[in-house]
Image (cartoon, rainbow, N blue to C red):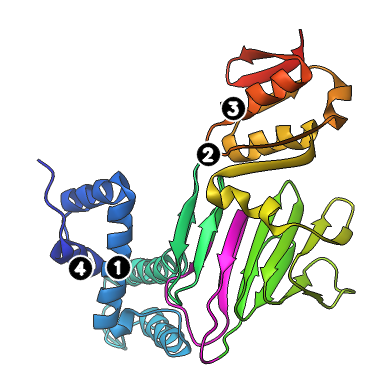
Amino acid sequence: MQADINKAIVFAYFSGNVTPDLKRHLHQWLQSNEQNHELYYQWLEEWLHQNPRHSFGTDEADADFAQLRRKITVLPADIPVADQGGPVKPLWRHWSRVAAVGVLLVVAISLYFYLRLDQEYIIHQTAFGQTKTVRLPDRSTVQLNANSQLKYSRWPGKGPREVFLRGEAFFSVMHTASHQKFIVHSPDMDVEVLGTEFNVSNRRGTTQVMLRTGKVRLHLESEPAIKEIVMAPGDLVKYAQATRSLTRSKTDADLHTAWRMGELVLNKTTLREIVQLLEDNYGLKVTLGEKELESQTFTATLPAGDPEVVLKAVAKSFGLQLQRRGNGVVLARK
C-alpha cells in the first residue's frame, strides 16, 4: 500500500533521509494531481526558510555554494599517498576516496541546479478550450486563455515583477507602494507597466498588445532601433516576426477580451483567421476545401466554450459541409 505523504515525509525527502521505496511513492503522489504539486512547493519554500544554508538564488547563497564546492574539491590533508622512506600505501584507498569526493561534488551541483532552476518558477498551463484565473503574489490577476502558459518566480525580490507568457492572457495589474514595475515577457516583446489592464497574445509568430486602461511601454527585443512604444487606452499594437512589421491602431477593447466572458466575438474575421483560432485554442485541425474561402469574412458573437458551435455556424453561413477525418475537420462546398 502506498504510504500517506505528509509534510514530515517531504521534509525528510528534502534532507535526503528517505528510502528508495518511499521516494518512489512520493514521486507518484507528486504527479497524481495539481494540488499535490502546489503543496509540494509550499512545503519546499517552508523547508528552505527553516534551512537557510540551502536557500539558493541569492548572492550570499551563491558564495556559500562556491565555498562548499571548494571544500569538496580539495582533497583532505590526511590522505597519505607515500611516506618518505617508508612503503607506498595502497593506491586503491586513495582513489576510492577521490571517487567518493567526486560523487559528492556531482550530487551537490545537481542539488544546486535542481533547487535553483527547476523549482524557482511557478507555472500555470491551460489545455485546449480551457481558461484559468491566476492570482499573483502582489494581488494582480491574470486570466489565461486556452492553450497558454504563465511562468513567474516563486520567490519574487524587490526588483521588477516579471512574468513570462506563451499564448494569450488578460492582465489586471495592481500598483504597489514602492512603484515596482510589472513586466510581461513574450518571445518578441516586453510589456512594462505600473498598474493597468491589458491583453497580450502571442500566436504563430505574431504578438499583439491591447491596452484597456492606464499606460504601458513596449520594448521590442528584435528591433533595437525602436527604443520603446508608449500605448494609450484603446491602442492595439501588433508585431509580426516573419515580416518584422509593426502596426498600431485604435480598437474596441471588448472585441479582444470577450473570451474572458466566455464569448467569441468575430467581426469581419476571415475564415483563414477562424481556422487558425480553432487550431490554437481548441487543438482542431481544420482544412478549407477551396483556397478562395480563406478570404471570406464572418461576423457573429458565439459561445467560446464549444468549437462545434463555431464550425456549424460557419458551415451554415457559407453553405459548407462538415467532413470529419479522424481528428481533423474539412469545410467544403456541398
Q: Which residue is mark 3?
A: 309
Task: Say which residue appears at 70% left-offset and 66% top-offset.
Answer: 211
Q: Which residue is mark 1?
A: 42
Q: Which residue is mark 2?
A: 129
- The span shown in magenta is 151-178
Vertical placement of residue 238 versus 231, above or below: above
Q: CA distance from mark 1 to mark 3?
A: 41 Å
Task: Give the residue at the far top of this rendering.
Answer: 334
The tag earlier along the polypeptide, 2 or 3, is 2
Disc 1 crowd rating (10 Å Cα; few below 14, some 14-19, many 20+) is few
- In the image, 221 versus 119, the foreground residue is 221
Under mark 2, the amino acid is: Gly
Task: Say which residue appears at 58% left-offset and 82% top-offset.
Answer: 160
| Image position of 81 (left or right of 67) | left
Q: CA distance from mark 1 to mark 2?
A: 29 Å
Q: CA distance from mark 4 to mark 2?
A: 37 Å
- The x, y position of residue 296, in whole percent, is 85, 29
Q: Secondary structure at mark 1?
A: helix
- The x, y position of residue 246, in whole percent, is 87, 61
Which quadrant: the N terminus? top left
Q: Which residue is mark 4?
A: 11
The tag earlier along the polypeptide, 1 or 2, is 1
Camera-nearest label, 2 or 3: 3
